[in-house]
Image: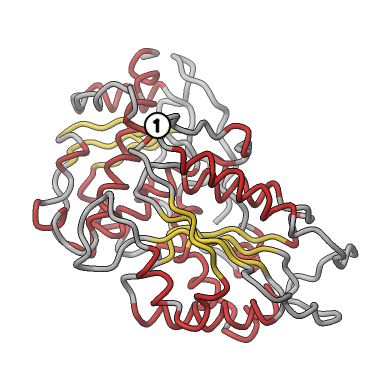
Amino acid sequence: MSSSPAPSGTGPTADAAPLSLCAREPHVPADRLVAEMVPPPRFDSVRFSTYIPDPNQPSQTEAVQVLESFAAGLGGTADSGKRRLFGFGRAPKKAPAGPRGVYLDGGYGVGKTHLLASLWHATPAEPELKAFGTFVELTNLVGALGFQKTVQTLSGHRLLCIDEFELDDPGDTVLVSTLLGKLVDAGVALAATSNTLPGKLGEGRFASADFLREIQGLSAHFRALRIDGEDYRHRGLPEAPPPYSDEEVATAARATEGASLDAFSPLLEHLARVHPSRYGALTDGIRAVCLTGVRPVPDQSTALRLVVLADRLYDREVPVMASGLPFDQLFSEEMLNGGYRKKYFRAISRLTALARDAGKLANSR
């Protein structure tokens, strides 16, 4: 599905009929999956120079320095002609000896994605020769193109960045590890962040040992960079705003051009009918998401789909205005103490940030 972006802005002249995510049934062709393997809009302008290290965490400054050197080392001869989408042309050179990958190891909210996107921007290669995506987006690409075609598509790249490498799905981990082995042999440099394994609790826990073990034979190709720190989204920021009333949310949706308005429970049901690879397309042209009746998610499958939607909204900087319960009550204590703990805390953190952003919607009603 392709949607034309709605004009930005709020006010009494806005369309009185809000959009609805539940009314959207996006279909995403494979070539769009490839073309969209770039840093998300939220990270269009990030650079190493815009990353502000915590002065109490020297590992953050060290990580920037190491990554700047890593990016500079990825220069060299490249096929400067127009890149073919599916890898036709001469075979790329074999990888040089030594580590060709970096792994950013730290808790949520320490700026790993900012640094990963900065590495993508700093690497001296044309955008078509660099790829950036989440682990889920990479597995979706394999599903859309097939394994061999994916290898052909990415083998001519200079750099592949993988955000949130999924250590909690053994089957997909083996699949992607095999893919990365082929790409390393083709000379592609790698960079990754990851989540934690099931049963490995604690938001401050570091995952490099798990990551290097799970990618098995690829571990020698990675240098782990530990990034200490607390969630930057909560450093000195106010607490999440309290939920609005249903009427306030509906009024803001009608007064905001490009806003969607959905009841929370039907939206959760709709997400079950849309593949998570299409959640980005689901939000095409949406300037704000307005939700009524937010309540705890009923089960883990629903919760994990909501995590993906939260990631896509955060990437696109789409404010979220909601009634019902505050976002820190979305997930049960059992979920927050389970194997997907880190994902749920990331979703809470990101939705809380987007809820703060939605304050301007309420103020302009």
Q: Secondary structure under badge 1?
A: loop
Q: Position of residue 189 (x, y in %)?
A: 66, 67
Pick the residue in front: 167 or 282.
167
Which quadrant would the N terminus be assigned to in this image?
bottom right
The mark total stands at: 1
Q: Nearer the viewer, residue 43 or 196?
A: 196
10 Å crowding of disc 1: few (<14), some (14-19), many (20+): few
Relative horizontal placement of residue 216, taking residue 41 as reference (left or right): left
Instruction: State the scheme by which the image is colored.
Output: secondary structure
Occupied quadrant, residue 355: top left
Where does residue 58 sit, x and y in percent of width and height?
46, 38
* Quarter of the C terminus within the rendering: top left
**Residue 24, position in %: x, y?**
42, 53
Residue 159: percent from left, percent from top: 67, 63
The residue sitting at the right extreme is: 81
| Residue closer to the observer: 238 or 54 | 54
Q: Residue at x 59, y 32 (%)?
A: 50
* Rendered residue at 33%/18% (across/down): 362
Residue at (50, 75) in percent of width and height: 219
**Residue under circle 1?**
56
Residue 303 vs residue 361: left or right? left
Tell me if residue 116 comes above or below residue 199 in the rendering: above
The residue closer to the viewer here, 210 or 15, is 210
Residue 26 visible here: no
Give the amino acid type for the residue marked by disc 1 in the picture.
Asn
Can the viewer see residue 257 in this picture? yes
Image quarter for residue 149? Answer: bottom right
Residue at the farthest bottom position: 148
Residue drawn at point x = 40 percent, y = 49 percent: 311
